[in-house]
Amino acid sequence: MNTLKRLQRLTGKPEPDLKKTSDKDETIGELRRRVETIMSRRPTASSPPPALFHGTPFTLESLVNGKEMENDWGTFFLAHDILPGSHKHGRHHLHSIANVNMQSLSFLANHPDIIHFKSSDALFLDTETTGLAGGTGTLPFLIGLGWFDGEDFITQQIFLRDFKEERAALVFLLELAREKRFLVTFNGKAFDIGLLSTRLIMNRLHDSLSGLPHLDLLHPSRRLLGHRTDNSRLATLEESILGLRRDGDLPGSEIPQRYFSWLKYRDARSMVDVFEHNRLDVISMVTLTIVLADILKSHNTTDYAEPYDLIAASRLMIDRGKSDEARSILETMIVAENRNIAREARRILSLIFKRAGLGDNAKIIWEMMIHDDPCDFFAAVELAKWFEHRERDYKRAFKVVHHALSQSGNLNITERESLNHRLKRLQIRNNI
C-alpha cells in the first residue's frame, strides 16, 4: 500500500483520479493536504513544549539551592530548603501540625501504630516521573521529601541528573527514611511507593519503604472533602480547601518533557519549575494533613471544618467501626440551624442507635424528624416499621404512613408507591 492510499484510509477521503493528470506537483500537494488533515486531528498540548534555550546552558547549582552528593554508589543532585514553622502556606501555618491529634492521623491512615508516633516522625514524600503508567519503564527522576526538625520544615529533593545516578539516589533515600517512622503521601499507595519499590527491587536494594505505616491523603480527602470539590486533585484541594493558588505553576502533564529536555540539553532552566512544583506539593501535604485531622476532632464547625465535613467524617467513622466517635459528632448537629444538616445528622444518628439495639433513642429522633417535616419519607418509614414490628401498634403505624401521604408534596413517585404499599398492608392488619 503506497503512502497516498494509507493517508486516504486515515482521512476517510476518496482516492483522487490521478489518471487525469500527470502533474507530479499536484500529487505532492494532495499528500501535503492529507498530512495536514491528520496533524490537525492531533490534540493540542496545554502549552507548547519548552523552547530550546540559547546561549550557554545554566547549571543546576546556579538556579536551584542544592549541591552534588556522593556515596559508595555514585553521585546525584540534592536540593535543600528550610521553612520556619511560622511560614503560612495558604490559610495555614506549618507549625500547626505540632498540635495535630495523632489518633486522628492513625484513623485517617487506618493504621493503629501511628497513634504512638509524633508528627515529627512523618516523612512527606512526592515523586516526579517520566510518565504515569508505572512499571519498569517509568523512572522517578525527582523525589521530594519533607520533615520537621523542631519547628522548621525541611525539604530535600533528590534529583537524578542521569539514569546512571538512580542507585546512589535510592540508597540515600533509604538512609533518610530509616530516621522516620511513617510516610505521608498524596496517592502514594497507588503510585509513588509502588513505583519506588519497583525501582528498589530492580536495583537489588532492600525495599524498606513499603513496610512503613502510610498515610495516603488522597483517600480521606475524597471521603471528607469530596462534597466541596469537583475532583480530588491536589491542585483543586489547594484552591478550594487550603486557600492556595499557584500562579504560573507548571502543569503536571509537562513535567516528563521538561526532564527529557534536561537530559538532551543539560540546561537547568528546563527544570526550575519542576523543582518548585514538587516542593509545593510536599508542603501542601502538611497543611492538608492539618485540615483533615482537625475535621475528625471537631464537634462544631471551625475555621477548617464545615458542617458537611463533619457529616462526612461521621460516615467514615461508622465505616471504620467507630460508631461512638460518630455519635459524639452527630449529637451536636441534630439541632443545627441548617435544616438539611440537622436532618442528615438525625438520619445517620438514628441508624447508629437502631443498629446498636437502642431503638427507643432512634424512635425519639424519628419523631423529631416527623414533627419538623411530616412527609419526611425516611422518618415515616422507620417510625412505621417501629410501631408495626416492635410495638405491634398497627394503628399508630397506619397513622404515621397516612399522615405522610396526606402531606406528600415533597414525595417522589417511588416514595409514594412505597408508602401506599405499606398503607395497604397496615389496613389489612387493622381490619380497615
Image (cartoon, grey):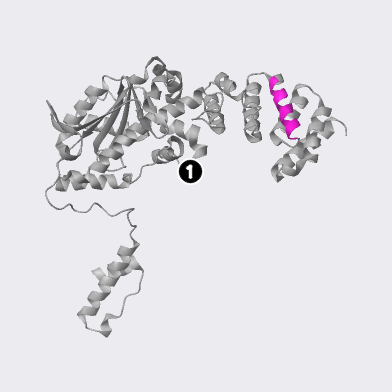
Q: How many marks?
A: 1
In which quadrant will I find the N terminus? Answer: bottom left
Label 1 CA crowd tier, 10 Å (few <14, some 14–19, many 20+)? few
Residue at point 42% right, 25% down? 109
Q: Position of residue 205 (x, y in %)?
A: 21, 26
User: From which residue to which does the magenta span run?
Assistant: 361-373
Which quadrant of the structure image shows residue 140?
A: top left
Q: Give the amino acid type for the residue marked by disc 1 in the picture.
A: Asp
Which quadrant of the structure image shows residue 408?
A: top right
Q: Position of residue 268 (x, y in %)?
A: 18, 43
304 versus 40 height, above or below: above
Which quadrant of the structure image shows residue 182?
A: top left
85 versus 187 height, above or below: above
Magenta residues: mostly which secondary structure? helix
Residue 164, magenta (yes or no): no
Which structural element holds mark 1? loop
Compare residues 388 and 230 and report the one nearer the observer. 230
In which quadrant will I find the C terminus? Answer: top right
Residue 162 visible in image: no
Q: Position of residue 316 (x, y in %)?
A: 52, 27
Residue 76 visible in image: yes
362 versus 409 height, above or below: above
